[in-house]
Image (cartoon, coloured by chain):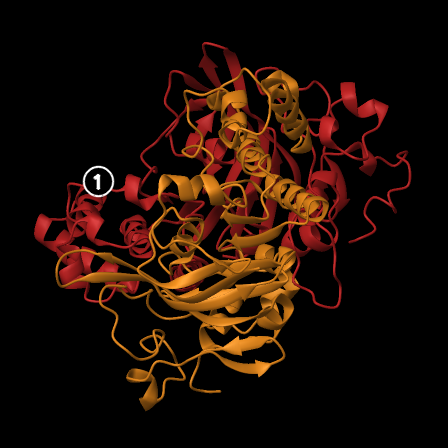
Amino acid sequence: MLKIKNLKKYFALNRKQQVHAVDDVSFAIQQHEVVGLVGESGSGKSTLGKTLVGLLDKTEGEVCFKDNKLPSVYKPEDFKKYSQQIQMIFQDPYTSLNPRMTVEEIISEGLKLTGRYSSQETSDKVVEWLENVGLNAAFLPRYPHEFSGGQRQRIGIARAMIIEPEFVVCDEPISAQDVSVQAQIINLLEKLKSSMGLTLLFIAHDLSMVRYISDRMAVMYLGKIVEIGPANDVYFRAKHPYTEFLIAANPEPDPELERHKIKHTIPGEIPSPINVKPGCRFASRCPKRMPECEHQTPQLKTVAEGHQVACHLY
Amino acid sequence: MGKDIILSVKNLAVEFETYGGIIKAVRDVSFDLQSGKTLAIVGESGCGKSVSVQALMGLIPMPPGRISNGDVLFKGRPIISQGEFVRRDYCGNEITMIFQDAMTALNPTMKIGKQIAETLIVHKGMSAKAAQKRAVELLELTKISEPDKRAKQFPFEFSGGMLQRAMIAMSLASEPDLLIADEPTTSLDVTIQAQILELMKELQRSLGMSIILITHDLGVVANMADDVVVMYAGEIVESAPLDDIFYRSSHPYTIGLQHAMPHNDESRPHVLIPIEGSPPDLFHPPVGCGYYARCPHAMKLCEKNRPPMFKSGEQHLAQCWLQHPDAPSTNNVFKNN
């Protein structure tokens, strides 16, 4: 359904320096599939998501959506064309809703832009969607500040889903929420996914949640995908040293597991993404570093069915 | 060390006067902390966990806030008696605190080393030069590389994890007996979180500190805590040693929290069960059990009658009518434990 080929997104700082936010990423997403994308902050997850929906221009490479190549720089009419199929849910429900618009205006705006529905149909649909996400019609004339974080996130979901898109990028939709609200949002997304036949790219840094909701899981580090495969394979049979560290660092809500877990913390922090040199991105922090890691960039290699790793160990 | 109690909080209550009325943020909270141990306070936003410890530290703005009741003993000495501060020289000295957002907790216009030295000058009466030297040592203790150079930098030159380390260094400056950590790793990546938690444990072992850790992440609790207090709507609903909380939970809220989190067990797939609804309005806290409206096992009794603390194990307390000897069988409620 979505094919990403050698996608790059660089931000120029000045004439000599470039931030390699997304660097040569290729993978495909099948129809009705949920792909989870994890990594530390600064690994380029959100930039990748925004590039896919056209909010950021592509520096190089291409993205094909159902065999149509998406433009590398979106013009206003491109947004109009593709936003009906591709939508995005944002991380921060406090800044992603216009504080001066009512809930009704926020949710109906996208639908009005399609110009396919009469005003009566539009308002019917808004009410229907408000109920689908677990809110009710009494909220229509209210403004975003009157809602809690979880309710705002539901408004953001309704705004994206009312268009009935085929592919949705969820950029950390649960990071700012409490545990019980996280579960509500995840269950809502799962329900919508099965009822609408959605395809999702689910970006988050909570590994347990990503494993829970995803069919496949991709791990990103400093602009590159280092491991991708079926969610359980990546989580329980991680191959890349970075993935192993991430999973070891993920706290389990179970004292017995925590006591018996091998504790190895990863030294240092994610390096600067400015003018990244060739070689493995993780080499500076990797305990299994070999001479070739310093100058040769590892490519994704298949190690098990559907499971690919970019590491010289394999 | 051992079984002696370093901090004892009894019947603490905190209120805030607002235009909308009085918010009863903390209602009748009591807990004990054993010397050299870690106590985790768990709960969702707005359940009163931060306010409880801010009250101990004298950090509640008064007005609009007010400690309406409570007795606090620290190392056997009364520090709050019937809601009044008896003495507060321990704040920031024998009890120190680290905060969630290190970027806003530190002064952006002051060099890191100087901020740490300030604590030493105020609480230890050190000379500026000696304090600066000690500040560098403290940065080294928290494993900041090149501490000499780092001490001369400003907060904006530090990453989130480094700032948290600097804040820990600052909190250790006065050699506290008790460290209160209010969501110290919530805004950090898991890898950095693991580093910071490991650092806290190491320092606890070497310095013999006691820790109060506030968090909403049960994973962090499982990793760090010796004892756990679960708060809901301004009250403690369950308190017990770590394993009892996870494996012998006696309050439906504690169980609800566990079921709402994914478990990584490949052989045992499961579905997330969210806690429906939202916490009660603390302008008018419920007369009965605070969790009544969301509790899947609520009984008629729970609506109007506040449950007392029932003992469900040696050190295990739960505020739930299901623990009453005449309550209906709880086998189906607690079957997953």
Chain at tag 1: B
Which residue: 33% across, 65% down? A269
- Residue lying farthest bottom? A291
Where does label 1 land, which residue? B107
Label 1 SS? loop
The vertical placement of B239 against A7, above or below, is above
B244 or A95, which lies in front?
Answer: A95
A148 or B91, which lies in front?
Answer: A148
* Direction from residue A128 to residue A57 in the image, left or right: left
The vertical placement of B233 against B137, above or below, is above
A268 or B333, which lies in front?
Answer: A268
The percent position of residue A309, horizontal first and vertical second, equals 49, 78
* Direction from residue A272 to residue A109 in the image, left or right: right
Q: Which chain is red?
A: B
Query: Can you see residue B92?
Result: yes
Q: Is the C terminus of chain B in the top left, top right, bottom left or bottom right quadrant? A: bottom right
In this rendering, the count of numbered labels is 1
The percent position of residue B4, horizontal first and vertical second, equals 53, 50
Dot 1, how many residues are within 10 Å of its Cα: few (below 14), some (14-19), or many (20+)? some
Q: Which chain is orange?
A: A
A242 or A121, which lies in front?
Answer: A121
The percent position of residue B12, horizontal first and vertical second, equals 54, 27
The percent position of residue B190, horizontal first and vertical second, equals 46, 59
Q: Amino acid at mark 1?
A: Asn
Query: Can you see residue B226?
Result: no
Choose top left, top right, bottom left or bottom right for residue B305. Answer: top right
